[in-house]
């Protein structure tokens, strides 16, 4: 699995996503905060569901704008 590693406002964020027809997945970890999110969706609104879930656990506007 290939992890994307990025720094947003000085925090290291690791994430990976994937998709297939009707399925969307996303995982992210923020080691400095002890936060991890894993989302599996099916249906046409997978991206919207993922964004809502991530926002609950990590409401960083700059990061959300890159999703």
Image (cartoon, grey):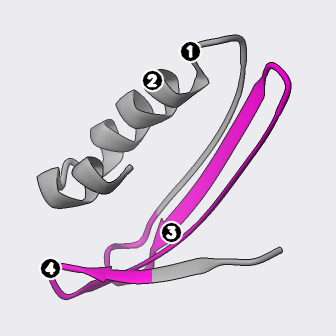
Q: Which residue lies at the image location 52% right of the left edge and 29% below the top edge?
A: 47
Q: Which residue lies at the image location 66% right of the left edge and 77% below the top edge?
A: 3
Residue 22, placed above or below residue 17:
above
Mark 4 secondary-structure assignment: loop
Q: In which quarter of the image is the N terminus?
A: bottom right
Mark 3 secondary-structure assignment: strand
* Mark carried by residue 6: none
* Mark toward the viewer: 1 or 3: 1
Q: Residues within 10 Å of mark 1 (few under 14, many from 20)?
A: few
| Location of mark 3 (residue) | 29
Of label 2 and label 4, which has the lower sequence position?
4
Of label 4 and label 3, which has the lower sequence position?
4
Q: Position of residue 31 (x, y in %)?
A: 44, 81
Give the Cα distance between marks 4 and 1.
29 Å
| Location of mark 4 (residue) | 9
Question: Quick one: 28 or 35, which is closer to the camera?
Answer: 28
Q: With 33 as the anchor, is 51 left or right in this view?
A: right
Q: Are marks 1 and 2 in contact (CB under 8 Å)?
A: yes
Q: Do the residues labelled 1 and 3 touch (CB within 8 Å)?
A: no
Q: Give the prevailing secondary structure in the magenta stretch.
A: strand
Q: Residues within 10 Å of mark 3 (few under 14, many from 20)?
A: some
């Amino acid at each position: 699995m290939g992890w994307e590693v990025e720094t947003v406002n000085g925090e290291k964020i690791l994430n990976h996503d994937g998709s297939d027809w009707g399925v969307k997945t996303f995982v992210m970890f923020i080691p400095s905060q002890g936060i991890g999110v894993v989302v599996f969706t099916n249906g046409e609104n997978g991206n919207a569901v993922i964004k809502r879930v991530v926002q609950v656990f990590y409401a960083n506007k700059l990061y959300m704008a890159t999703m």
